[in-house]
């Protein structure tokens, strides 16, 4: 008899400092795919669901499809969004009658109005439906704020090992193999989670250059070869979340009896994370430095990444200060992707391609971070903003920026959107009639993920702090629920 395996995805990276709640409508606009429709949507993609689809076929499972839900990082999920999507998963499990195993694709830093540890609550609820003996595995983002509650109700937590995250498919295949081994009685995994008194660490998980995160991952993979240990996962945490468990953690799935080996592996990784806690590779430059670099031309684009306005971390995606500075400096050949401004997009749609309109662009979500750019703009291109990623990250997945207008201000083309979305793929520009290869300067709203697609075309990459919500200075935020004492906010001698 084929194993019946519940497969679902429920993802969100919640920035609790954001003033924007995350609604069910946000999920409906970006990704809320129910039941069997998941298969045509994700088959052949490098997403976790693409991995689970292939694994189900390989292992001869009878999949029970729950839901695939994901939307851009923002504030806490409304109670409605959280309960509706949670219940779609629980209902699918209940309706199936018998469930032999569960494969979930989660983020691990989701917070709702009612649950500080939403994935822990979800796993506990799933466990309540399927019972204590059914293998339950979850893939996580490496920026998960993982908790002991998640580990208690899952048999394994398997996190990304790349940042930019380009191994969702591989991690799902790994997690599914563990499930298959458990179903065949070859393994009885259970999960240990250890968390140090650190709010951040391991260079925020960057794997694009040699350094602490790559060293930790190499050690984790060596630990996985020890008898009794399965997946050894490193989560570096998500700083912009005022919950007790924000910060790095180590999850080790292991056999019964290998508790001491698992604990030793976790403690060794944490000791190295602690001793190298000040290693941090990304250095933000000022707007003035960015403009100075933009004045020097080259045969390939300078890529300016506005990491502190990164919607991939909950940034508002409409910080206007860098755009204003480039405009004031008269820099030619610039492409900006993207500025969120649905009102201006509507204005452009009403005026039509070729029209000239007076705009107040960006800066609407929190004007204290920068006022809108006042200018006359030419409408160059209009579209519904949909495209399919063709870069290394989430390849093949369909994306929607919502109604989108390309506006030309001076020498700058701005991809102006209606949905918050970090810039990880060249199609953000190409689908809007802009070839980024030919531009002098390309501005992206991303802190790290952009590197997978944009570093290969860049003459230079520069991270810019143009004044967004996602400052890397943790002391700028008011934490009231975080566990204390914690490094770097408090002085402590050991983790
Ligand atoms: Zn991440």
Image (cartoon, helix red, strand yellow):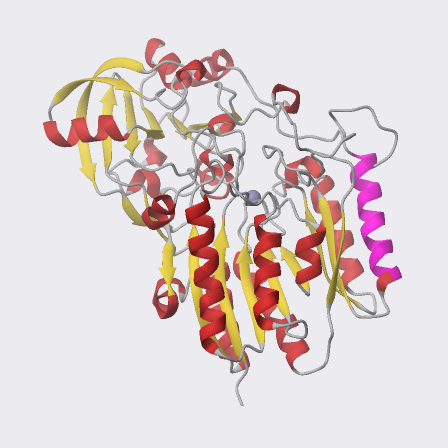
Given the current orientation, which residue lies at the most extreme top position?
328
Give the x, y percent position of residue 166: 53, 52
Give the x, y percent position of residue 329: 36, 9
Location of the C terminus by quadrant is top right
Instruction: Quadrant for residue 258, please give it.
Output: bottom right
User: Which sits in the foreground, 412 or 302?
Assistant: 412
Residue under the point 58% across and 32% down: 240
Instruction: Quadrant for residue 484, please give it.
Output: top right
Q: Is residue 208 magenta?
A: no
Image-based side of 90 in relation to 426, left or right: right
Span colored in magenta: 260-276
Magenta stretch: dominant SS? helix
User: Which sits in the foreground, 288 or 367?
Assistant: 367
Give the x, y percent position of residue 335: 33, 28
Location of the N terminus by quadrant is bottom right
Image-based side of 408 in relation to 6, left or right: left
Q: Is residue 273 magenta?
A: yes
Residue under the point 31% across and 41% down: 401
For residue 235, above or below residue 347? below
């Amino acid at each position: 008899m084929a194993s019946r395996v519940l497969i679902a995805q429920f993802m969100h990276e919640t920035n609790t400092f954001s003033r924007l709640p995350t609604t069910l409508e946000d999920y409906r606009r970006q990704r809320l795919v129910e039941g069997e429709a998941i298969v045509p949507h994700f088959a052949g993609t490098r997403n976790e669901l693409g991995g689970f689809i292939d694994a189900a076929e390989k292992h001869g499972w009878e999949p029970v499809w729950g839901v695939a839900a994901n939307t851009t990082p923002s504030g806490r999920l409304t109670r409605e969004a959280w309960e509706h999507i949670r219940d779609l998963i629980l209902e699918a499990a209940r309706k199936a009658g018998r469930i032999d195993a569960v494969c979930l694709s989660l983020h691990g830093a989701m917070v709702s109005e009612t649950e500080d540890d939403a994935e822990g609550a979800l796993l506990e609820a799933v466990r309540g439906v399927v019972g204590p003996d059914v293998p339950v595995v979850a893939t996580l983002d490496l920026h998960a704020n993982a908790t002991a509650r998640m580990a208690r109700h899952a048999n394994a937590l398997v996190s990304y090992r790349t940042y930019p995250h380009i191994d969702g498919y591989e991690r799902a295949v790994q997690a599914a193999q563990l499930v298959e081994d458990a179903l065949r009685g070859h393994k009885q995994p259970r999960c240990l989670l250890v968390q140090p008194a650190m709010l951040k660490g391991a260079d925020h998980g960057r794997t694009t250059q040699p350094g602490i995160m790559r060293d930790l991952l190499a050690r984790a993979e060596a630990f996985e070869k020890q008898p009794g240990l399965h997946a050894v996962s490193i989560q570096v945490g998500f700083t912009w979340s005022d919950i007790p468990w924000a910060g790095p953690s180590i999850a080790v799935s292991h056999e019964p009896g290998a508790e001491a080996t698992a604990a030793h592996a976790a403690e060794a990784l944490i000791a190295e994370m602690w001793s190298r806690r000040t290693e941090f590779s990304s250095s933000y430059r000022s707007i003035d430095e960015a403009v100075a670099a933009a004045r020097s031309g080259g045969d390939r684009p300078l890529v300016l990444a506005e990491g502190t306005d990164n919607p991939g971390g909950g940034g508002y995606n409409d910080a206007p200060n860098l755009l204003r500075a480039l405009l004031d400096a008269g820099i030619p050949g610039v492409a900006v992707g993207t500025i969120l401004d649905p009102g201006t997009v509507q204005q452009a749609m009403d005026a039509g391609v070729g029209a000239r309109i007076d705009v107040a662009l960006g800066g609407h979500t929190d004007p204290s971070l920068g006022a809108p750019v006042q200018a006359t703009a030419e409408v160059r291109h209009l579209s519904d903003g949909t495209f399919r990623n063709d870069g290394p990250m989430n390849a093949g997945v369909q994306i929607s920026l919502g109604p989108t207008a390309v506006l030309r201000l001076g020498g700058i083309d701005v991809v102006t959107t209606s949905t918050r979305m970090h810039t990880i793929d060249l199609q953000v520009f190409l689908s809007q009639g802009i070839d980024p290869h030919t531009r002098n300067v390309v501005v992206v709203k991303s802190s790290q993920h952009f590197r997978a697609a944009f570093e290969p075309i860049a003459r230079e990459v520069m991270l810019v702090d143009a004044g967004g919500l996602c400052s890397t200075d943790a002391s700028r935020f008011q934490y009231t629920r975080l566990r204390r004492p914690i490094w770097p906010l408090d002085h402590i001698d050991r983790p």
